[in-house]
Image (cartoon, grey):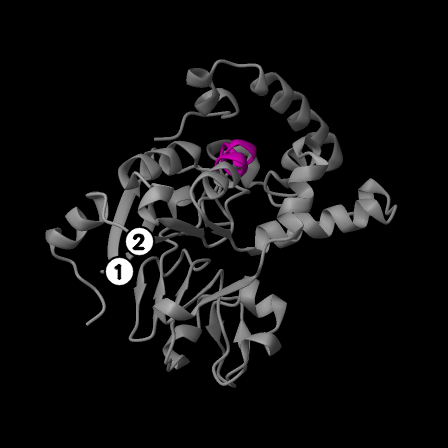
Amino acid sequence: MLFAGASVWVAAALSGSHNRTVFIGDVHGCLHELSQMLGKLQLRRRRGDRVIFLGDVIAKGPFPLETFRLVKKTIASISGELLLGNHEASLLRYFDQRDAGLPAANRHGVGEGNLAIAEALSQIEIQWLRSRPRVLPIPELGIIAVHAGLRAGIPLAKQRPQDLAAMRSLDDTGAPSSRAGNTSWALSWRGPQHVIFGHDAKRRLQRYEFATGIDTGCVYGGSLTALVVPGFALLHVPAKRAYCSPHANVSMKLQHPNCARAPKRRKMLGFMANYTRWLRLKPENKSIALFNVRLP
């Protein structure tokens, strides 16, 4: 049995044990929750700790830029990796289109807060992001980390990038699907490596014999989850509020502006002006500065 729900494992995960590998699910710009999680973990390079972020640290939530920079700083100071999620991949497509001279109105990948972070990242940060992997095998642990999913029976080198970043399910024909309404791809994964993944917030915590999904919907009001190896202890930090809604019929007035998928140019220009003013605010005021209506 891989999972240990007993408090002794949680205590061990927090007690400063050595050689911990920590996997953190989709952060989505939830800076406060990530800071709280890192405070609980007390990661230390000298203890042999490392941290693997499973992707989608940006987009949707209130602090995508600050979250990205905290992730980068944590990896540099401890050890670890950031895997490319579908939102990081979308941001890189935007940079590719921009660098190719495509007119701004025709570029993709600027929704859900990506335009603001695209304008703020330095060239060094962009190059660092470009060098991040989509999948990370960790042979000494018998683990493969990926943002979304893997297709059974296909070598890692031949897995499709779109599946690594966006797959959630298999349809009735066994083909990969980004929808969560079909059967989870993880049910078909028979090992021997154990896959740790994120991306599938609708299903929240997923536990299978050879796979574990730890996107527990922090940006939607759920929690941020970390999985600590050895022991497979699960740690959770509850979201401060629901920043976005997964339901399309919920008014944007009740959500953070970064939740907007593809804002019109005029609205985006207004958002950028608000974002610039927000950057000048004191930290204690930032968490509510861009909300049109206070969330419950």
- Graded by Cα atoms within 10 Å as few (under 14), some (14 to 19) or many (20 or more), the crowding at tag 2 reads some
Quarter residue 23 falls in: bottom left
Where does the N terminus fall, quadrant-wise? bottom left
Q: Is residue 263 visible?
A: no
Residue 20 lies, in percent from the top left, at 31, 53
Residue at screen point 57% across, 61% down: 134
Q: Is residue 219 visible?
A: yes
Q: Tell which tag, 2 or 1, sits nearer the viewer.
A: 2
Residue at screen point 19% across, 43% down: 15
**Residue located beneath label 1 in the image:** 230
Numbered label tally:
2
Query: Label 1 is placed on what type of residue?
Result: Pro
Which residues are drawn in magenta?
Answer: 62-70
Residue 17 lies, in percent from the top left, at 23, 48
**Residue located beneath label 2 in the image:** 19
Residue that lies at the very extreme toward the front in this rendered image: 46
Q: Nearer the viewer, residue 45 or 222?
A: 45
Q: Nearer the viewer, residue 144 or 29?
A: 144
Q: Main secondary structure of the magenta part?
A: helix
Residue at screen point 22% across, 44% down: 14
Residue 170 lies, in percent from the top left, at 48, 77
Give the vertical position of 280 relative to 34 (above or below).
above
Query: Label 2 is placed on what type of residue?
Result: Asn
Give the vertical position of 283 relative to 137 (above or below).
above
- Graded by Cα atoms within 10 Å as few (under 14), some (14 to 19) or many (20 or more), the crowding at tag 1 reads some
Asked if residue 67 is among those painted magenta in the image, a careful observer would answer: yes
Residue 287 lies, in percent from the top left, at 44, 24
Q: Please report contact status of discs 2 and 1: CB closer than 8 Å, yes or no.
A: yes
Label 2, secondary structure: give it.
Answer: loop
